[in-house]
Amino acid sequence: MQLLGIGSRIKHAEFGMGVVTNVSSKHYWVTFMDKGLETIKIDEGFEVIEALENDVDTVSFLEVETSLMSILKRWSDVTEQVAIADKWKGGNLVLEPGDSSLSNKEIPIDTFFHKIVMVRDRIRVMEQKINASKNLDDQEKVDLQQYITRIYGSLTTFNVLFKNKSDQFVGERSS
């Protein structure tokens, strides 16, 4: 079976005339004149009008982008987008001192939430670096992991701010 290159022209029984705009190991992304962009299987029946034989990488741009994002998310200090619970959007955090002669401190809750998320993400990076360290033995890694788990547990108070449960802090679970 001939693998079509990007720019190849085909005629599909259902979608009509189209041009191959992307290729993966299992699919062609084809822009059809009448139907727009469609994904079809490589072995699906269609007529080849003009086959271009350029170097076709069997990994699509989307697959490369997804892999790169996963690597960057795992190993960098980049903060992911985390949603604040709707009820807190636009709100303020008010710190009221015990001494009534002093004034309150007011902080936009979105700013406070962003700082909490940055702390969480930096703890995750530290955890990954500990686990990947060649200089620590297994027992030292376990000891440090227990501290990290306790840190997460101390931060569970802030879980009320997170929109999605999957983004929340999780500490030690009791059995």
Image (tube, grey):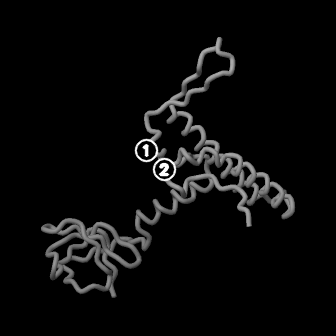
Give the crowd class for mark 1: few <14, some 14-19, many >=20 residues within 10 Å.
few
Please, what is the three-letter code of the amino acid marked with disc 2? Lys
Give the crowd class for mark 2: few <14, some 14-19, many >=20 residues within 10 Å.
some
Seen in the image, is 20 located left or right of residue 125? left
Query: Percent position (x, y) of residue 97?
Result: 66, 21
- Please give the name of the residue rendered at 34% of the width and 80% of the height, measured from the top-left corner: 3
Q: Is residue 76 above or below residue 70?
A: above
- Please give the name of the residue rendered at 24% of the width and 86% of the height, measured from the top-left corner: 45
**Is mark 1 in CB contact (under 8 Å) with mark 2?**
yes
- Please give the name of the residue rendered at 18% of the width and 69% of the height, measured from the top-left corner: 32
Indicate the quadrant containing the N terminus: top left, top right, bottom left or bottom right.
bottom left
Indicate the quadrant containing the C terminus: top left, top right, bottom left or bottom right.
bottom right
Secondary structure, mark 2, is loop
Identify residue for label 1. Answer: 86
Seen in the image, is 122 located left or right of residue 90? right
Residue 14: assigned label:
none
Decide which of tag 1 and tag 2 comes sooner along the chain: 1
Nearer-the-camera pick, 7 or 105: 105
Secondary structure, mark 1, is helix
Query: Percent position (x, y) of residue 64?
Result: 47, 63
Query: Percent position (x, y) of residue 77?
Result: 61, 46
| Image quadrant in which you'd find residue 93 | top right
Q: How many marks?
A: 2
Seen in the image, is 143 located left or right of residue 125? right
Please, what is the three-letter code of the amino acid marked with disc 1? Asp
- Please give the name of the residue rendered at 71% of the width and 54% of the height, measured from the top-left corner: 127
Gap in Å between the C-alphas at discs 1 and 2? Answer: 7 Å
Q: Is residue 40 above or below residue 43?
A: above
Identify residue for label 2. Answer: 163
Query: Percent position (x, y) of residue 173?
Result: 71, 61
Nearer-the-camera pick, 110 or 68: 110
